């Protein structure tokens, strides 16, 4: 009877302690314990499928626009070559010269409008993504009773580049002990079950492994 009782006690202690041991693993193991966490926003941007898909789509549109503008440039160059065959004082040359001036002005306007549109759309993608990231961080912090979440850079310092060394020296967070919630927030963003206010990922798929 005593043996059974001791066995039950030991088994109960093991079962009770198992979840605690499981919680003390992973990059964010100590976050709830300390009530503070760090998050690598740059990493989240690079590994958030919605953001990467939006940027890939925007890049394709930029390439299509560049191709169209290249066609306009080629047409102008062809007319410039044609103009060289005319006498500068001839009516044909003057007419073609005026047409070239008009085409170049129109091309400059097209380039300016295209650049402005792309920059504005890119800015909106970054803004929307940042709002989704901060909302996900806020949701995670509330769920895990975190009073403060600091931004940090989880990339190691590259000793081969002086600029990278200076950036590393100026890092806000010098040391963190198991309070990196970046992988958890990444999974939250890329999962289909994101909380209200956080848009779900554009495409579901395997997410990159955290450093």
Image (cartoon, rainbow, N blue to C red):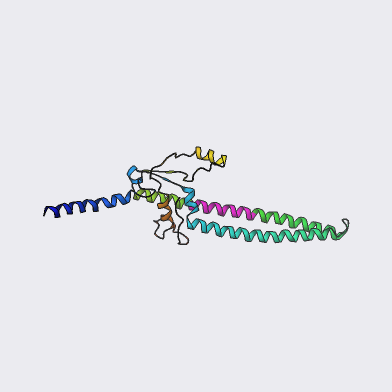
For image coordinates 66% across by 61% down, the residue present is: 67
Q: Residue furthest left?
A: 1
Left or right: where does residue 153 sit relative to residue 107? left
Find out whether residue 102 is within the magenta segment: no
Left or right: where does residue 194 sit relative to residue 90? left
Could you say where residue 172 lies in the image, as x and y percent from the top left?
A: 46, 39
Q: Nearer the viewer, residue 20 or 98?
A: 20
Could you say where residue 24 lies in the image, as x and y percent from the top left?
A: 33, 48
Q: On the image, which quarter does residue 200 sit in? A: bottom left
Could you say where residue 88 lies in the image, as x and y percent from the top left?
A: 87, 56
Residue 141 in view: yes
Could you say where residue 147 lies in the image, as x and y percent from the top left?
A: 36, 43
Q: Nearer the viewer, residue 182 or 16?
A: 16
For image coordinates 29% across by 49% down, the residue present is: 20
Q: Is residue 3 above or below residue 174?
A: below
Q: Taken as a whole, is the magenta stretch helix, strand or loop?
A: helix
Q: Quadrant of the N terminus?
A: bottom left
Numbered range of the magenta stretch: 113-129
Left or right: where does residue 62 sit relative to residue 135? right
For image coordinates 77% across by 57% down, the residue present is: 100
Residue 197 in view: no
Q: Count all numbered tags in the image, as a single digit.
A: 0
Q: Residue furthest front?
A: 3
Left or right: where does residue 94 sit relative to residue 73? right
Find out whether residue 117 is within the magenta segment: yes
For image coordinates 67% across by 56% down, the residue present is: 110
């Amino acid at each position: 009877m005593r043996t059974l009782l001791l066995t039950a006690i030991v088994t109960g202690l093991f079962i009770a302690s198992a979840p605690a041991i499981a919680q003390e693993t992973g990059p964010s193991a100590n976050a709830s314990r300390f009530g503070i966490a760090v998050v690598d926003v740059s990493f989240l941007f690079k590994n958030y499928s919605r953001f990467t898909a939006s940027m890939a789509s925007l890049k394709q549109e930029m390439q299509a626009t560049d191709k169209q503008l290249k066609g306009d440039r080629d047409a102008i160059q062809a007319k410039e070559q044609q103009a060289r065959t005319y006498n500068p004082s001839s009516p044909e040359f003057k007419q073609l010269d005026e047409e070239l001036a008009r085409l170049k002005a129109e091309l400059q306007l097209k380039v300016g409008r295209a650049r402005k549109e792309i920059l504005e759309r890119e800015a909106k993608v970054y803004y929307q993504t940042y709002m989704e990231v901060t909302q996900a961080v806020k949701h995670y912090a509330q769920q895990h009773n975190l009073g403060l979440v600091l931004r940090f850079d989880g990339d190691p310092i590259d000793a081969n580049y002086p600029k990278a060394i200076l950036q590393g020296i100026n890092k806000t967070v010098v040391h963190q002990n198991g309070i990196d919630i970046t992988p958890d927030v990444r999974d939250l963003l890329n999962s289909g079950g994101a909380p209200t206010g956080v848009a779900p990922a554009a495409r579901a798929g395997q997410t990159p492994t955290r450093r």
